[in-house]
Amino acid sequence: MKQAPHFKPQRAILALILTVVSLPVLASSDCDAPTSQWQSREAVRELAAQQGWQIERLKIDDGCYEIRGTDAQGRRFKAKLDPETLQVLKIKSREHDDHHKDREREHRRDHTSQDADAAPSSPLFTPGGTPRGQVQ
């Protein structure tokens, strides 16, 4: 006779507690420095100038400074900075996003510029021809 494996609820509870406790640490990319210790927006602008960045937008997001702009080579980017240390926490190129958006615009323009009265392609209908089929 085969015995069922022995289930230890203490281990399961411990694993659950450790998972729940570690979730905020793993999921959070937010900054949590108290505002009294933040560096000024002017300090962010000075850092950007030193890096050769042109700021298009400077805002606060999830407790961090967020910059959208162009780098010294003219590439668009988005950067998240720690407000206390001004350390770059995350930086993302926006060139790919812009290229993708341009392609979507072209695709929509191509499809909307077609004649609105034109019938869709179908074996039953041909432009300028007599409809084929039988209605019952």
Image (cartoon, rainbow, N blue to C red):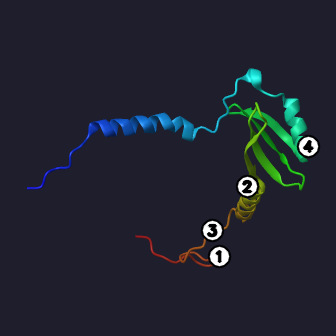
Residues at badges 3 and 1 in contact (C-beta under 8 Å)?
yes
Number of residues whose C-alpha sits closer than 10 Å to that of mark 4, classed few (under 14), some (14–19) or many (20 or more): few
**What is the C-alpha distance between the residues marked 3 and 1?**
8 Å
Residue for badge 3: 119
In this rendering, would 4 be left or right of 62? left
The tag earlier along the polypeptide, 2 or 3, is 2
In this rendering, would 40 be left or right of 116? right
Which of the two discs, 4 and 3, sits closer to the camera?
A: 4
Residues at badges 4 and 1 in contact (C-beta under 8 Å)?
no
Residues at badges 2 and 3 in contact (C-beta under 8 Å)?
no
The tag earlier along the polypeptide, 4 or 1, is 4
The tag earlier along the polypeptide, 2 or 1, is 2
**What is the C-alpha distance between the residues marked 4 and 2?**
26 Å
Residue for badge 2: 97
Judged from the image, the secondary structure of the residue bearing numbered disc 2 is: helix
Residue for badge 1: 127
Residue for badge 4: 50
**What is the C-alpha distance between the residues marked 4 and 1?**
63 Å
The tag earlier along the polypeptide, 4 or 2, is 4
Residue 22: numbered disc: none
Q: Where is the C terminus found, in terms of image quarters?
A: bottom left
Furthest toward the top, the residue is 36
User: Could you tell me residue 94's position as x and y percent?
Assistant: 76, 53
User: Could you tell me residue 12's position as x and y percent?
Assistant: 33, 39
The amino acid pointed to by label 4 is: Gln
The amino acid pointed to by label 2 is: Asp
